[in-house]
Image (spheres, helix red, strand yellow):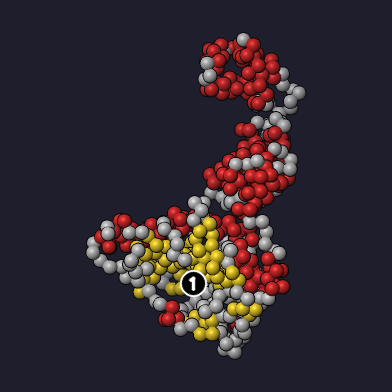
Amino acid sequence: MKIDSLPTVIGLESHVQLSTKSKLFCACPTRGKEPNSAVCPVCLGHPGSKPVLNKTAVEMAAKVALALNCKVNPSFFFSRKTYFYPDMSKNFQITQYEIPLSENGFVELDSGKKIRIRRLHLEEDPAALIHEKGFTLVDYNRAGIPLIEIVTEPDLASAREAREFLNKLWTILGFLDVFSPGEDVLKADCNLSISGHAKVEIKNVSGFQAVERALLAEEKRQRELLSQGEEIRQQTRGFDDKSGRTVLQREKETEADYGYIFEPDLVSSTIDSKWMDAIRSTLPELPFQKARRFVREFGLSDYDAKVLCSNKKLSDLFESVSKRVSPGLGSRFLSRELLGILNFNRLEIDSVALSEKELGDLLELLESGKVSEKNAKQAAIEYVLSGVAPKVFLEKSGLLIDLGSVDTEKIVESVLLANPQAVSELKQGNQKSLNFLLGQMMRQAKGKANPRELQGFIEKKIKKK
């Protein structure tokens, strides 16, 4: 079989920091200001220190497991993963190996393909290594922060599918309120092989685009080696974003190399049915459920509902403004204008302060004809970039339309009389002529006319002629 026809096989191990107030096995805060200030004997690995499991972390992890259609094990325990590296001072990481918190879930892609989740388990984050010129600094503030690791089966067939899976996962996590979206809390280890050949792991890739680029680069590297008659060696590699290549870190270890043993300082944990029911009761409406409701209740298209439910904050904004204006206007303005402004300025919606009331005020003005679409968009731009409330911006800029101060019909008649050629072309169905006439009328009205009202008058006048 030709190398190009061999399928690509991809599996992901996604690591997500949970937004608990304290660490996984001690009372240290998860957010320390100064390096090595949020530490104690437990997270520093001092001899004789004893870990205590964080109940909130277990509840958050179980909540994620349920949202990912996983089976939560009623009993589980922790193990020691032995390795020697500066980021883990006690020379082992407390994680789960034999019996994880949960297993056997799935995430469904837009195509309907289900990507199976092999396991979801809890573990502690290592310390952060800061590489300066000629030396490396270690910050143990991060050591012990609770992580969940979500391991897929090798069901992904392309880098594009891997990116879509992570996008779906990120959206679900955002609705669950178990992490801080604005922070670098999701990283993936990417396992890729060409069917029938050895697997290569790409470690610690951050960001959906970076994951896609890393997988494309590694797939290209492996196919080139195979086409030259060379075999793929099982390795651990990193991704150099600047060069767009994967780089060798070490020859790949096996799980046996880590010498897993049962964690003797922690007893087995049990989630009884009462506790499980309490966790299940905290599950919110998930993205796909909310999208279906938006289609049913508001008459949105499947596509528009999906866009609005790609982010919890965006879906909440839509639901709020739709109590004040038509759902069609709310959907169109938020999914096209607002997201367009954010994307153009490379901003994430979760990093920008957006008030449901202030956006609702703007859309009410737009729907009532008291502001043009062009000026409404300009107000939204100012709001996103400088925080000035849209209504305040419009008032100070003199862009609000006083519907009683402009003789709309008189302006229409004047412009139509002055532009007979454009009127003739409009009668023949030339849309550019309509836009030209509207522009002339808005100029004469100094922006204080309602374009929809002007268009209505134009249509009436044209029919009469």
Look at 44% across and 73% down and name the residue there. 135
Q: Circle 1 — which element?
A: strand
Image side of residue 228 versus residue 222, left or right: left
Look at 62% across and 14% down and name the residue there. 463
Q: Quadrant of the C terminus?
A: top right
> In x, y percent, where is residue 396?
71, 36
Look at 23% across and 64% down and name the residue there. 229
Residue at the bottom extreme, as displayed: 48
For the residue pair 364 and 319, the one nearer the viewer reads as 319
Q: Which residue type carries mark 1?
A: Leu
Residue 95 appears in the figure: no
> In x, y percent, where is residue 292?
63, 49
Residue named by callout 1: 129
For the residue pair 234 and 377, the one nearer the viewer reads as 234
> In x, y percent, where is residue 354?
67, 48
For the residue pair 378 and 50, the one nearer the viewer reads as 50
